[in-house]
Amino acid sequence: MEQYFYEAFEGLTRLAPGSTQSTQKAASLVSFNKLNTLQILDIGCGKGAQTLELAKQFPHAHITAIDQHQPFLDDLTAKAKRQGLDNRITTINMSMFEMAFQPESFDLIWAEGSIYIAGFQTGLEQWKSLLKPGGYLICSEVSWLHDNPSSEIRAFWEEDYPDIDTIPNKINQIIEHHYDYQFSFVLPKEDWTEGYYNPLEANLKSLEQQYSNVSDALEVVTMFRQEIKLYHDYSNDFSYVFYGMVKR
């Protein structure tokens, strides 16, 4: 089934909702002097759209980008070389659960659409030691947009990702884990549709035609289509939210 999951993302720029504009906005809210030499860790970088953008937003930074799917890392390395950024981006095949970095190695940790793999509070707690004092953790995280989401979408997310919570509760968790909360903003709906679901839906149609008699492939198609339908039905109830915080 994993094969078909990855095939669903062939040719896509992103593996989760997002956009260049949202990455730029989050980066603009970091108060570092962008002319300083910074060490940035991009956790769960995927195909690296945000990695390349971070290299442009922080022109003197070195970025270490980790993921466990080598073809994604190879794709990012090739793009970085074409854009003349390969001397500033290092890719490593590494699990976010087994990061072999020295404590206080990074000025900025970036986790765009990936902290849910660890769980929001687990990520906040376990990654903190890798940050220098005063370093930033920036992540995008699925969150409720109000206190009373519809029962169907609540049941879906609480089974799939029990860490989902409201934005005020997420902010409280940030503070409880000894960070200073800096900012949050909700991703626009275009980040879900134009940046993610529309190209994904085109790939799903191709998968359905190519593997019409393969049950595992059709199960992947069905899973993604259910997710897409739930978003369109309940997009006022939840979204990805960028959160920015500083290690005390």
Image (cartoon, rainbow, N blue to C red):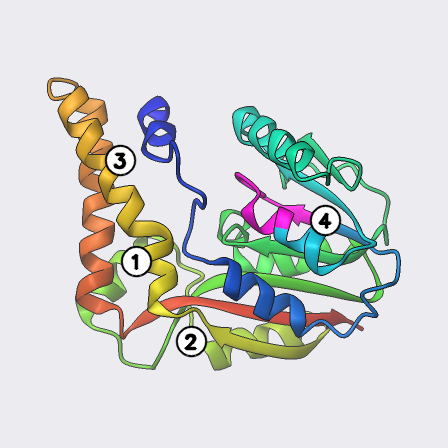
Total tally of numbered discs in the picture: 4
Residue located beneath label 3 in the image: 203
Which circle marks residue 166 in the picture? 2
Q: Earlier in the sequence, mark 2 or mark 1?
A: 2
Residue 194 belongs to the span the image colors magenta: no
Residue lying at 51% horizontally and 65% vertically, measured from the top left: 22
Q: Earlier in the sequence, mark 4 or mark 1?
A: 4
The kind of residue on which mark 2 rests is Thr
Foreground: disc 4 or disc 2: 4
Q: Is residue 31 above or below residue 112?
A: below
Residue lying at 20% horizontally and 29% vertically, measured from the top left: 206
Q: Position of residue 41 (x, y in %)?
A: 72, 49
The kind of residue on which mark 4 rests is Leu
Q: Quadrant of residue 212?
A: top left
Q: For label 1, count other residues whose C-alpha is less than 10 Å away and answer few (under 14), some (14-19) or many (20+).
A: some
User: Which secondary structure lies at badge 1?
Assistant: helix
Left or right, residue 73 beside residue 117: right
